[in-house]
Amino acid sequence: MATSSASLPTMTLQLGSYQTAVDSKLQDFRNRNFTAGFWQKQADLWVSDAEGQQSIRSFMGWLRVVDTMLPAVAEMEQFVQEVKDAGFRHVVVMGMGGSSMTPIVFRQAFEHLAKGLPLSVLDTTNPGSVREIEQAVPLAETLFVVASKSGTTAEPLAFGDYFYARLKELKGDKAGENFVAITDPGSQFVTQATAEGYRRIFLNFSEVGGRFSALSYFGLVPAALYGIDIKTLLERAQVMMRATGAEGPVDHNPGLELGTALGVLAEQGRDKLTLVVPADLSDLGLWLEQLIAESTGKQGKGILPVAGDPLGSPAVYGSDRVFVYVGYQSQPDEDNRRQVAALQAAGHPVITILLHDPLDLGAEFFRWEVATAVASAVFGINPFDQPNVQAAKTATNQLMQVVETEGQLPQTSTPVVSEDGLDYYADVTGSSAAEVLGTFFGQAKANDFLCLQAYLMETPALNTTLDGLRALVQQRLHLATAAGYGPRFLHSTGQYHKGGPDNGLFLQITTDHPHDLPLPGRTYTFGTLQNAQAAGDLQALQDYHRRTLRVHLGAGGEQAGMERLLTALKKALT
């Protein structure tokens, strides 16, 4: 039975010389009846070992979660009305990774369309960011959604404890009325949320992994509170689901075609998926980063999503790119489209996806989930595990044990150079900041990438400075650049950093926290936790023999420190 794709977002693949290899792999998949096996959770499509196959079967509940969630729409909408009737005026979603990425995308894409409660998302342990949320919302009239699949994730539990203590000061024993939990059945967080009198506990599905949970309660409860038409969102996802073979054979499977293209391109060296989007879809990159990098970045393989990389002329790109443009059919976005056309004319593979409106994000979430699983089948890896994520968590936990016993983090190594208020920690040598930076970047090879890891408070000004640093590296060294705020990326691209190919240069940026915040029930602060996460991740990267440089910003503020770093880098790369 052929499935009509008339109402789907359109997708065009312009793959040039790679088309033959992609067609060959697609034919191979068809010969193996891949689509039917996919929907039957046939785990040997990915791996041959029994343990890996069992893991895969255990995490494929996302395939039909849309059918499960559609009957739950009325329940969620009724909950939203209850919240409004109770006088709530704001919503703060507190989570990490799969528990926070989808609400971030929704908040931006529907900013001028949603008619519900204003929505904020907290997914950083930076004390400045926590304080910013606290000062921006009416605490007594704010609903706090604490989202953690496992119920053990350190960051959302810390956020929940902090704001629960604040509400306790305001409302006493009624503090729990301001809190909602989203977690898996049986998690220890259920016990805590029940004891603290949470207004509602939404139990998600254990067979749906975090990064595949966009169309479950983790994505839909915040969307409903924000005022998004979640019924239409799910119905469009259901159309995409059927187009990918959920109800039988299809002529063209958009998830299979996209995933096969991405997998084959990556195997032929085009492993940097460079996302180009209009401004109101820029946060889609955060979601794609986690989904793709954490699913495919293992066993020395992987696809690196590159979001927010300054779009340049064809001359600044190597042969490691595939460009994916995601926009709206009715939105011209002329500059981006013109530059993408120039890249395609220069021989770079280009994939174009055009949405009707933001409600098509439901369909796109599903398309990309299928595509990510398919690309993993091209690689022959399990897309649903994250074997290298634990390394940074373990290192961080060891550091926090030191904090518990000694009251502070252990001393770090001595900087190679201290200059202009900045401390440089690296394995490379040099007598000045420019020399250290020059030697560090001198290690770059063709098709490497730079990863900027900012354990700082995100601000528009800081984003601009990071963009300037990325543009400089791209222009001078022709490297792909990725940037993330810690600890957010530890729950997304962190898997790729340790488990993917050894083709990254990691520039970690840390700072002190003169205006720190205490954590209720703990002997340490938010700032200490963030610093421990930075140190733990750096240790994990070094244990995997990655090329690292840490720059610690001194007194004078993060923005001023970053500008001094950019000045030093310009000198180094002259």
Image (tube, rainbow, N blue to C red):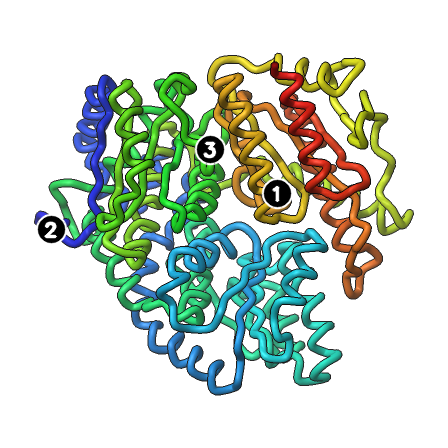
Disc 3 secondary structure class: loop
Q: Nearer the viewer, residue 182 or 205?
A: 182
Q: Give the numbered dot on residue 394.
A: none
The amino acid marked with disc number 3 is Asp
Q: Which mark is residue 462?
A: 1
Q: Is residue 562 above or below residue 94?
A: above
Residue 4, which numbered label?
Answer: 2
Which quarter shows the C terminus? top right
Q: Amino acid at mark 2?
A: Ser
Residue 393 percent coordinates (x, y): 67, 43
Query: CA–CA distance between discs 3 and 1?
Result: 15 Å
* Cβ atoms under marks 3 and 2 closer than 8 Å: no
Q: Nearer the N terminus, badge 3 or badge 1?
A: 3
In the foreground, 284 or 98: 284
Q: Secondary structure at mark 1?
A: helix
- Circle 3 residues within 10 Å: few <14, some 14–19, many ≥20: some
Give the vertical position of 78 relative to 421 (above or below): below
Query: In this image, 82 relative to 215: left or right?
Result: right
Residue depicted at x 32% and y 54%: 361
- At a point 75% along the width and 54% down the height, the residue shown is 526
Coordinates of residue 245 in the picture (x, y in percent): 20, 48
Horizontal arrangement in the rendering, residue 115 relative to residue 440 (left or right):
left
Q: Earlier in the sequence, mark 3 or mark 2?
A: 2
Q: Nearer the viewer, mark 3 or mark 1?
A: 1
Q: CA distance from mark 3 to mark 2?
A: 35 Å
- Spatial CA span between label 2 and label 1: 46 Å
Residue at the spot of label 3: 309
**Residue neighbourhood size for the residue with mark 1, other residues' Cα within 10 Å, grouped as few (<14), some (14–19), many (≥20):** some
The kind of residue tagged 1 is Leu
Q: Residue at x 66, y 80 (%)?
A: 175
Can residue 216 be seen by looking at this rendering?
Answer: yes
